[in-house]
Amino acid sequence: MSFEKNFVLIFFTAMGVMLGAVLAGSLAAIMVREPPLDTMLKLAREIKIWAVVTAIGGTFSTIEILESGILKGEIVVVVKQVFYIVGALAGTHLGHLIILALAGGEK
């Protein structure tokens, strides 16, 4: 898969993990009679790093690629991994902003 396709896939996967987790969590909050908006905001803050890790396919493979790229002097591989991580962070942040907009902002 090309770099651009992989980047877009990672971006939207991170955003989808964020939105899906918060949606499922808010439904669970309704079932147990908790305020869903408060639960959405709390989950949105707490799940960010897990959405990034999920989108890049786990931490160990990324760390192995970074390590081999640095030790072997393959700068292009390292730069690609950094861009993938930044893309996952951007997708997660966009998902977080969407949730904040839907929930009416931070409380």
Image (cartoon, rainbow, N blue to C red):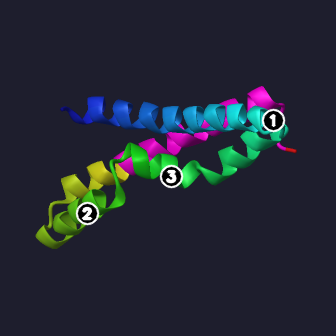
Callout 1: helix, strand or loop?
Answer: helix
> Which residue is under mark 3?
50
- Which of these two is toward me, 87 or 102? 102
Residue 79 image offset from top left, x and y in percent? 29, 53
> Which residue is under mark 1?
37
Q: Is residue 24 above or below residue 69?
A: above
Name the kind of residue labelled 2 in the image.
Leu
Region in magenta: 84-106
User: Could one spot residue 73 in this view of the protein?
Assistant: yes
Number of marks in the rendered image: 3
Q: Residue at x 75, y 38 (%)?
A: 29
Find the distance from the CA under tag 3 to the CA under tag 2: 19 Å
Residue 27 image offset from top left, x and y in percent? 70, 31
The furthest residue to the right: 107
Marks 2 and 1, the one that precedes in the sequence:
1
**Residue 65 lies within the magenta run:** no
- Mark 3, other Cα within 10 Å: few <14 / some 14–19 / many ≥20: some
Name the kind of residue labelled 3 in the image.
Trp
Q: Residue at x 18, y 63 (%)?
A: 69
Q: Residue at x 65, y 39 (%)?
A: 96
